[in-house]
C-alpha cells in the first residue's frame, strides 16, 4: 500500500492506494491545478502495535451496555419491582444509575405510598410502599385495603388512602 504525501509536510496524507493508481491520480490532479505543491509517493510503513488502543477496542460500547442495563431493569419491572429501590436491589445497579435510566427511558414507576390513619386518632398513621406491605402491618388482606381506598371505608379501624409522592 502506498500513500501520496506532501514533500514539505510528510505527515499529511493526500491519498492512499496502489502505486500505478496513485501515479495516475497525481498526474490528473497536477494537470487540473488541484495540487500545485510538490508531492511524493511513499510506501506506507507498518503501524507499531499499540496495547492501549487494542484494549480500548475490546471495551464494550457504552450505548450497548446501557441498552443491556435497561433490558435488565425492564425485566425486573415486569417481575413486580415498581420502585427505584426494589429495581436497584433486584438488578444490582446503584439507585442513582437506576434512577437515571428510568428517567431517560421513561419507565413508569409507582412513586406513591399507601397510608392508613386511625379513625379516632389522626396522629396514629401507618404507611407502606405497597398495598401488601400496608396489609401486613395492619393484618388485613390487600383486596380489602384496595376496596376501602376506593370507597373511603375503614379497615381495622383505619382510613385508607393512596398518597402520590412529589
Image (cartoon, helix red, strand yellow):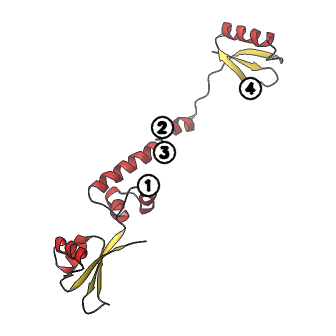
Q: Is residue 4 left or right of residue 128?
A: right
Q: Which residue is mark 1?
A: 101
- For the point 43% across and 45% down, the residue is 65
The local crowd at label 4, few if under 14, some if 14 to 19, many if 20 or more residues have their Cα within 10 Å, is few
102 and 166: which is toward the camera: 166
Q: Is residue 118 left or right of residue 18?
A: left
- Badge 4 vs badge 2, beta-carbon distance below 8 Å: no
- For the point 39% across and 50% down, the residue is 70
Tag shown at residue 58: 2
Q: Position of residue 91 (x, y in %)?
A: 34, 56
- Dividing the picture into quarters, in which one does residue 125 lie? bottom left
Q: Which residue is mark 3?
A: 62
Which comes sooner in the sequence, label 3 or label 4?
A: 4
In the rendered image, the residue lying farthest to the front is 151
Which comes sooner in the sequence, label 1 or label 3?
A: 3
In the rendered image, which quarter contains the C terminus?
A: bottom left
Which comes sooner in the sequence, label 4 or label 2?
A: 4
Q: Which residue is mark 4?
A: 12
**Secondary structure at numbered mark 1:** helix
Q: Position of residue 78 (x, y in %)?
A: 28, 54
Which comes sooner in the sequence, label 1 or label 2?
A: 2
In whole angstroms, how far apart are the C-alphas of marks 4 and 2? Answer: 29 Å
The local crowd at label 3, few if under 14, some if 14 to 19, many if 20 or more residues have their Cα within 10 Å, is few
Q: Position of residue 34 (x, y in %)?
A: 79, 17
- Badge 1 vs badge 4, beta-carbon distance below 8 Å: no
The label nearer to you, 1 versus 4, is 1
- For the point 37% across and 59% down, the residue is 108
In whole angstroms, how far apart are the C-alphas of marks 3 and 4? Answer: 32 Å
Amino acid at each position: 500500500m502506498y500513500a501520496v504525501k506532501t514533500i514539505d509536510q510528510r505527515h499529511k496524507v493526500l491519498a492512499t492506494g496502489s502505486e500505478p493508481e496513485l501515479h495516475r491520480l497525481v498526474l490528473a490532479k497536477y494537470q487540473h491545478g488541484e495540487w500545485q505543491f510538490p508531492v511524493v509517493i511513499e510506501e506506507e510503513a507498518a503501524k507499531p502495535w499499540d496495547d492501549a488502543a487494542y484494549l480500548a477496542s475490546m471495551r464494550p460500547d457504552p450505548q450497548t451496555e446501557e441498552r443491556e442495563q435497561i433490558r435488565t431493569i425492564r425485566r425486573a419491572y415486569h417481575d413486580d419491582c415498581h420502585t427505584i429501590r426494589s429495581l436497584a436491589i433486584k438488578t444490582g445497579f446503584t439507585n442513582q444509575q437506576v434512577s437515571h435510566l428510568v428517567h431517560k427511558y421513561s419507565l413508569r414507576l409507582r412513586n406513591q405510598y399507601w397510608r392508613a390513619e386511625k379513625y379516632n386518632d389522626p396522629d396514629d398513621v401507618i404507611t407502606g410502599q405497597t398495598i401488601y406491605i400496608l396489609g401486613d402491618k395492619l393484618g388485613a388482606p390487600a383486596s380489602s385495603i384496595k376496596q376501602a381506598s376506593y370507597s373511603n371505608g375503614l379497615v381495622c379501624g383505619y382510613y385508607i388512602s393512596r398518597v402520590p409522592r412529589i
